[in-house]
Amino acid sequence: MTEIRVPTLGESVSEATIGRWFKKPGDTVAADEALVELETDKVTLEVNAPAAGVLTDVVAKDGETVTPGALLGQIAEGAAGAPRPAPAAPIVAPPPAASSAAPAAEAPSRPPAPSAAKIAKEQGVDLSGIVGSGKQGQVLKGDVLALAARPAPAAPEPVSAPPAPRPTAPPADAEREERVRMSRLRQTIAKRLKEAQSNAAMLTTFNEVDMSSVMALRNRYKELFEKKHQVKLGFMGFFVKACCKALEEVPAVNAEIDGSDVIYKHYCHIGVAVGTDKGLVVPVVRDADRMSVAEIEKAIGDFGRKAREGKLDLEDLTGGTFTISNGGIYGSLMSTPILNAPQSGILGMHKIEERPVVVAGKIEIRPMMYLALSYDHRIVDGKEAVTFLVRVKEQLEDPARLVLDL
């Protein structure tokens, strides 16, 4: 037998949730074939078969919480491998005749699943008396969540008063509802966003940028750029470079608070928010201040592909010093992005929209974009926040400055 165990999950990741098994007991598996999906608070990863053979045991079921090194299942080695024989049916003695003296004892049930016991302890749910939906009545994680979601029973009415009718949800509404367990990634996103709002003195300041020059430069060179660098020329490369220049001048936006200290980062690891079907992830372009626009575009393109395929590594998502979020690709005209803690700044890009603006005393139609900088006011002053946005605006409205390092 070959054991399948939880691999090392990475720095600061102590547990994972079983997302789903791709194979079931009795299935033949090839070496290095994906067997099970694990969800951590950072990424979703796959555990591959350590050997070829037949999957005989699945120890950790879907939804259970596991730790590094925990046993997931077993494989009977061999290309053909024989599936595990079905267990013999237990011999059950005939039940005793019913007696008025004492009721017959119920058959013992299995202990609750570890994930169910953990949630029950956290939410104060009493598991005694619950008949679970698992085998032999085992209480599963979903049973605890369903019980916790039920409203507490109302106090009994006095005997003298007729019972008040209890309102119930219309059956038609209940049939149209769906309860879906939040993924570990979504739970972590929710937790961290709430912590950012609670812990930081978050404030947002706005500006707008005329995208005419960047758009003209892009239209002029996009074909030549793609031919030479094998990547499309987008807007994000310009924004990343512009932010790196602004961060050099306003280092507080590239810093973080650690207790009573402020840590200033003399490098630019820029996180670029990417939406996936499982939630928002923020891969990090490391040392973006040392990269060309082409190198940045290549890195972002690779991250986007890996995010869509669910192949981002933990190293791809850690160490960021500043974040850029582009809600404009979804049509957002203006927003107030939430900090990606412990960072002290995040830039929100938005939809490019033609608007009338005054240029040299005349009204002209220009492609304009609103920019939003959310920042931690504990270490970033209003003057510094405004200066940062102005520098980003200047770089983008005169992109030659990015090339000439001005």
Image (tube, helix red, strand yellow):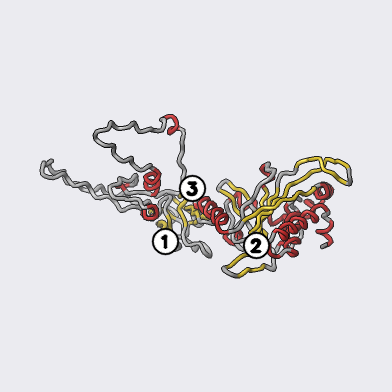
Q: Position of residue 267 (x, y in %)?
A: 69, 66
Q: Is mark 2 in CB contact (under 8 Å) with mark 3?
A: no
- Residue mark closest to the camera, 2 vs 1: 2
Image-based side of 52 in relation to 290, left or right: left
Q: Which residue is mark 1?
A: 70
- The amino acid type found where label 3 is placed reads Met
Q: Secondary structure at mark 2?
A: loop
Mark 1 is surrounded, within 10 Å at the Cα level, by few (under 14), some (14 to 19) or many (20 or more) other residues, namely some
Q: Which residue is mark 2?
A: 321
- Residue mark closest to the camera, 2 vs 3: 2
Return the disc, 2 or 3, that comes first in the chain's sequence: 3
The N terminus is located in which quarter? bottom left
Q: Which residue is mark 3?
A: 182
Q: Position of residue 85 (x, y in %)?
A: 33, 50
**Near-viewer residue (70 or 29):** 70
Return the disc, 2 or 1, that comes first in the chain's sequence: 1
Residue drawn where x is 52% and y is 56% of the image: 41
Q: Is mark 1 in CB contact (under 8 Å) with mark 3?
A: no
Q: Residue extending furthest front?
A: 160
Image-based side of 310 in relation to 37, left or right: right
> Where is residue 161, by image quadrant?
top left
